[in-house]
Image (cartoon, helix red, strand yellow):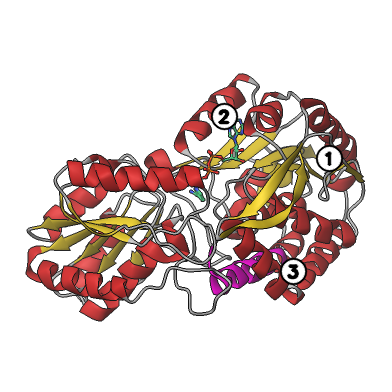
Amino acid sequence: MSNYANYINGQWVDSSKTTRNLNPADLSDVIGEFAQASEQDTQAAIAAARDAAPAWGLSTPQQRFDILDRAGSAILARKEELGKLLAREEGKTLAEAIGEAGRAGQIFKFFAGEALRQTGELVPSVRPGLTVEITREPVGVVGLITPWNFPIAIPAWKIAPALAFGNCVVIKPADLVPACTWELVKILVDAGLSAGVLNLVMGRGSVVGEALVNSPDVDAISFTGSVGTGRAIAQKCMATGKKVQLEMGGKNPMVVLDDADLPTAVEACINGAFYSTGQRCTASSRLIVTEGIHDRFVEAMVARMKQLRVGNPLDSETHIGPVVDDKQLKQDLDYIDIARSEGATVHGGELVELGTKGHFLQPALAVDTHNDMRINREEVFGPFASVIKVKDYDEALKLANDTEFGLAAGICSTSLKYVQHFKRHAQAGMVMVNVPTAGVDYHVPFGGRKGSSHGPREQGSYAKEFYTTVKTAYVNAG
Ligand code: NAD
């Protein structure tokens, strides 16, 4: 028996199969037993969403506003409690986790407003007597597949626009972090959603995720996760004619120029590389530093890293929480070994023993690296960054763009000329100037280029590109 059931067609539905969700900072702390949905459960959830779609698609903007706004208020009122749950299940610090929970609340408030802000266009026809109306309609049933590293914000930034624009939802959270999505769904149910409009199916990607992706009754899939999984999903979506949106990995550069303000650059790089245990798609993993500031920068980074306290996320003195699980920890340690075997010098990167059994790792900085090394091509997804020394801005820009990814790119400089040039020529969806590559606002578009993203942007007013479909109507009123 689970103590967290799936939610299908307005009912909490248990399963004989469960997974146990553990706290990565204390493996004796069990967060709960979560029901694992079967393929049949997933089909039932899709059928319920399909049945509910016509009525929800015709609900008034006011009805949608009221539910999303109530949900946003409930999340904001409970952000400390939800943040604590998030810190326990994923491992980011309590301050980061409360911030993420608050952001989820703000996202619901924003999309409550978006439900009211929908407009169309009235265009004169080129033919006499006709007018043309351009309107947006819901896509229908959307399947949402989310990763483990933002357990409440990513489900929120997919569920909120999906519902705001009149779609019905089947959501599958990452197996490692189902608790936050479960709480989010409960809040939305309590806010007054009708049966079938929102369905939760927790479980394995190979069972639940595949069933969503292959179903002819799902109109669109929004996925966030790794490149391999995303590309395989895209192919299946093409085969079944679905709309698809993918947000995937990154290998984000942070360029530090000779004229940078050193303390600003160091803080931006420490935050971008190591906060949230480096487990962010927007993490600054390649620090590309010009030779005039390189040695001072490395010295300051290493000194600053020594002040970072790795520990239990619930302890207010902790700066860096644990790695999410043993598999990710092994991946991080393997890349530290690869860095050394490729000729880099690694500062930090030691395992940390604490009073509880958990996956604690010191941040690691690889220096004397070049852009062709595996550690600079592949996403590590841990508290690991490398420094690449370059001659000047031109070489820095060239290497910043020499990657298969294109999510975020940063520059630390006091030169208007270089900053302006970088903003225009960085091949990334998001450019950050004198701020970390990670950390974004909730009311503006989010997404990348090249191997990082596929399909329309998420968040802000741009979210409607994915969650609506455009209709052009020709009217002869004569
Ligand atoms: P993942 O690809 O392993 O899993 C993501 C989701 O896909 C999970 O819910 C998983 O169960 C599901 N899944 C797995 N196999 C599936 C299949 N065959 N069919 C359908 N669904 C399947 O990724 P992860 O390890 O959870 O997350 C880490 C990755 O996410 C990193 O690469 C990171 O960069 C990326 N990420 C990207 C963004 C972004 O917005 N660009 C944000 C956060 C994380």
Q: Which residues are magenta?
A: 92-108
What residue does disc 2 label? 233
Q: Are marks 3 and 1 in contact (CB under 8 Å)?
A: no
Residue at the (66%, 34%) spot, across then down: 204
Of labels 3 and 2, earlier in sequence is: 3
Q: Amino acid at mark 3?
A: Ile
> Going 20% across and 54% down the picture, which residue do you hit?
397
Whether 374 is drawn above or below 66: the answer is above
Of the residues under marks 3 and 1, which one precedes in the sequence? 3
Question: Of circles 2 and 1, which is in front?
Answer: 2
Left or right of residue 9, residue 299 in this image: left
Disc 2 versus disc 1: distance between alpha carbons? 48 Å
Q: Residue furthest front?
A: 355
Q: Residue furthest top?
A: 239
**Mark 1 C-beta to ligand 1 under 8 Å:** no
Q: Quadrant of residue 302?
A: bottom left
Which amino acid type is shown beneath numbered disc 2? Ile
Q: Find the distance from the CA under tag 3 to the CA under tag 1.
A: 52 Å
Q: Is residue 254 left or right of residue 222?
A: left
Q: For the residue labelled by badge 2, is the local secondary structure a helix, a strand or a loop? A: helix
Q: CA distance from mark 3 to mark 2?
A: 31 Å
Q: Which residue is mark 3?
A: 75
Q: Residues within 10 Å of mark 2 (few under 14, many from 20)?
A: many
Q: Residue 252 at what x, y percent from top left?
A: 34, 53
Q: Which residue is mark 1?
A: 478
The quadrant of the rendered image in which ligand 1 is seen is: top right
Question: Callout 1, which amino acid?
Answer: Gly
262 or 425, which lies in front?
A: 262
The part of the image, by quadrant, that contains residue 433 is: bottom left
